[in-house]
Image (cartoon, helix red, strand yellow):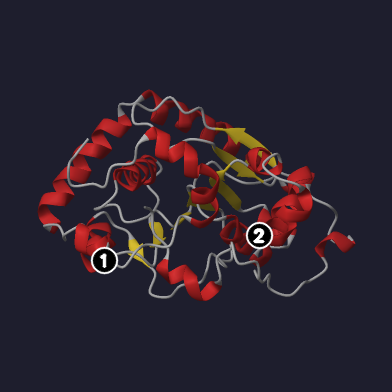
Amino acid sequence: MNEEFCKVTRKKWIAHRGLQRRTRRISDKSYDKDCPDVDVDKFVKKLETTCLQMQDSDYFVQSLATLKESLSKLETDNQTETLKRLVCFGIGPFTRNFQALHQLAFILSLQKEYQIKEALYFDPIFRQSEKEILEKFNCLVMSENCEAKYEADIQTLFYMPHCPNCLTNNLLWKNWQGKYLKNIILINNSFESLACSKPERLLRLDSSYILDIMPYAQELPLEDDYEVHNVFNDLSIHIFPESNLPVKASEFWTEKEAPTYNDVEMIYAEDFAKLSIE
């Protein structure tokens, strides 16, 4: 493990697992001071090496197979196995955190494998150097924080590893029509695990759209056998085949106002710009 990154022990991860999944922790002001900036060209080489290692890993090979399976299920709904767009939210400060680095190596490798031309990334914690690094890998960094309210007007792979539930909830709200949901391939925290994590009355506070769509979604777990711990735990591919969804005229699709999050333990929209990984 490279000394450039802030180490996270397994004991510490287990103790904070539930909290980290939901909030990704609001960073201390000292975080940036403890992690100096990087040389862009040197880090690009480091990231290229990490991508090559990722592409040789059993985890990546198996994940590709699972993604291909999910795309084949959508193909029966007049979709194709060609991914047209990639949107990545909340990857984290990848020059300062080794989990984020490996997650980025995964999605960049997948982006290369599928030759995705439109690749959009956003995390409010990105430094200028991290934005420059992404641009060198043919990625476009979004200029505005849409809080994951992004419309899937074409088939889009959303990569949101270990992001707060409210961001996934926002994504689903923005696409709460069959013609949009069918375009979403979502890699993020397992819906099934989420449903078992706490009582429904609490989940409804920040995950109501997730709970409502679960009966119609198909979840394909990504087996975590990656050599680096705590990077890809509890992630799944979620798809929403049109043939599974309620009919267009159903009250299920009644238009609703944008979700809000008032509980003190949740991420407020104005706090999203402060999110980071400890």
Q: How many marks?
A: 2
Identified at 53% across, 31% down, the residue is 66
Give the secondary structure at mark 2: helix
Location of residue 57 by image quarter: top left
Q: Tell me the residue at 40%/53% (across/down).
A: 91
Residue drawn at x 62%, y 43% is 238
Where disc 1 sits, the SS reads: loop
Q: Could you tell me the amino acid type at mark 1?
A: Arg
Residue 172 numbered mark, or none: 2
How far is disc 2 from disc 1 in space, using C-alphas?
Answer: 28 Å
Q: Which residue is mark 1?
A: 127
Q: Position of residue 16 (x, y in %)?
A: 48, 45
Seen from the viewer's position, the closer of residues 176 and 228 is 228
The location of residue 276, given as percent across then percent down, is 39, 59
Vertical side of 182 occupied by 30: above or below: below
Amino acid type for the residue under numbered disc 2? Leu
Viewport quadrant of the N terminus: top left
Graded by Cα atoms within 10 Å as few (under 14), some (14 to 19) or many (20 or more), the crowding at tag 1 reads some
Left or right of 259, for residue 143: left
Determine whether 191 is above or below 201 in the image: above
